[in-house]
Amino acid sequence: MTNAIELRGVEKTFGVTKVIQNINLKIAQGERHALIGPNGAGKSTTFNLISGYMRPTTGSILLRGEEIAGLRPFQINRRGLSRSFQVTNVFANMSVWENLRCAVLWATGQRYAFWKNIDNLPEVRERTAQILEYIHLADRRDMPAGLLTYAEQRALEIGITVAGGADVILLDEPTAGMSHAETERAVELIRRLTEGRTLLIVEHDMSVVFGLADKISVLVYGQIIASGTPEEIRGNAKVKEAYLGEEAA
Ligand SMILES: Nc1ncnc2c1ncn2[C@@H]1O[C@H](COP(=O)(O)OP(=O)(O)OP(=O)(O)O)[C@@H](O)[C@H]1O
């Protein structure tokens, strides 16, 4: 089967610094794949390359077998890849409902037009209501997103990321800054919302990574030093030395 995402010989250089060095990575369709590594290893840069926010210096990036390196973010989004950001990225003055509806509208190809009552579009309304229910924010429906708690905003952001129906989802540190209980709820949410889709997640919390991922890749100084199942990664001496230490023991 064609991989959902494949990176072939990808490199990214800023000035004279090679931040990403010859990355080769395959993520199968339907797989939940975690990208881990120390601060500054190049995880966000890898996300930016895959989602079109940066162009690789060399190499090839394939989405379901088709080259996407060099395409703009919205073009990649149109091909079914959606990403969230490390920093919460919701429209603070818009209600929770409007935030989600915006994402659904964009995905269904509808554009805002003042003469259209967009709440009368049944498919948009139903999809928005469904996501609202999934992310457990139905009772916050009309609240400006900026007034939600931090964890609720992150849940909304995950909802926005999946609302468009993309089948390849990239989440950048979705549980950063959450309490233990909030993290557990977020993991459940991510598990449910990405059912049957492909997920690539950057995450520092190892309980999230080992609880959620089918495969893990470890990035150190811009290079993937290991890629495999959670058990393989846990037992990998190079990974322990470079990153996990006693954490995963
Ligand atoms: N636009 C840029 N220009 C120059 N250097 C950059 C740029 N973006 C990132 N870098 C550098 O690339 C390296 C990798 O950064 P990146 O943010 O991808 O790491 P990361 O693994 O996501 O780190 P963290 O876990 O702290 O988020 C860092 O040394 C960073 O300073």
Image: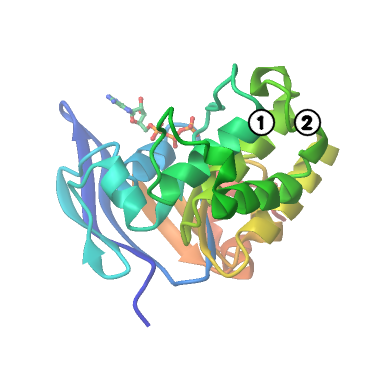
Q: For this rendering, which residue is in front, 210 or 54?
A: 54
Check the image and report above or below for 218 versus 118. below
Counting from the top left corner in percent of width and height, residue 184 is at 79, 47
- Is 68 left, or right, of 190 in this rendering? left
The residue located at (52%, 71%) in the rendering is: 30
Mark 1 / mark 2, whichever is N-terminal: 1
User: Image quarter for residue 132?
Assistant: top right
User: Quarter of the image containing the N terminus?
Assistant: bottom left
The residue located at (27%, 70%) in the rendering is: 65
Counting from the top left corner in percent of width and height, residue 22 is at 24, 53
Check the image and report above or below for 217 versus 105. below
- CA distance separating discs 1 and 2: 7 Å
User: Quarter of the image containing the C terminus?
Assistant: bottom right
Task: Identify the colour scheme used.
Answer: rainbow
Q: Which residue is mark 2?
A: 140
Q: Is mark 1 within 8 Å of ligand 1?
A: no
Which residue is outermost to the bottom?
1
In the image, what residue type sits under mark 1? Val
**Quick check: can you spot residue 228?**
yes
Q: Residues within 10 Å of mark 1 (few under 14, many from 20)?
A: many
Asked which secondary structure carries label 2, the reply is helix
Q: Which residue is mark 1?
A: 96
Which residue is outermost to the front?
115
Picture quarter with ligand 1: top left
Q: For this rendering, which residue is in front, 15 or 213?
A: 213
**Quick check: can you spot residue 173?**
no
Marks 1 and 2 in Cβ contact (< 8 Å) = yes
- Is 43 left, or right, of 71 in this rendering? right
Q: For this rendering, which residue is in front, 210 or 94?
A: 94
Q: Residues within 10 Å of mark 2 (few under 14, many from 20)?
A: some
Q: For this rendering, which residue is in front, 230 or 48?
A: 48
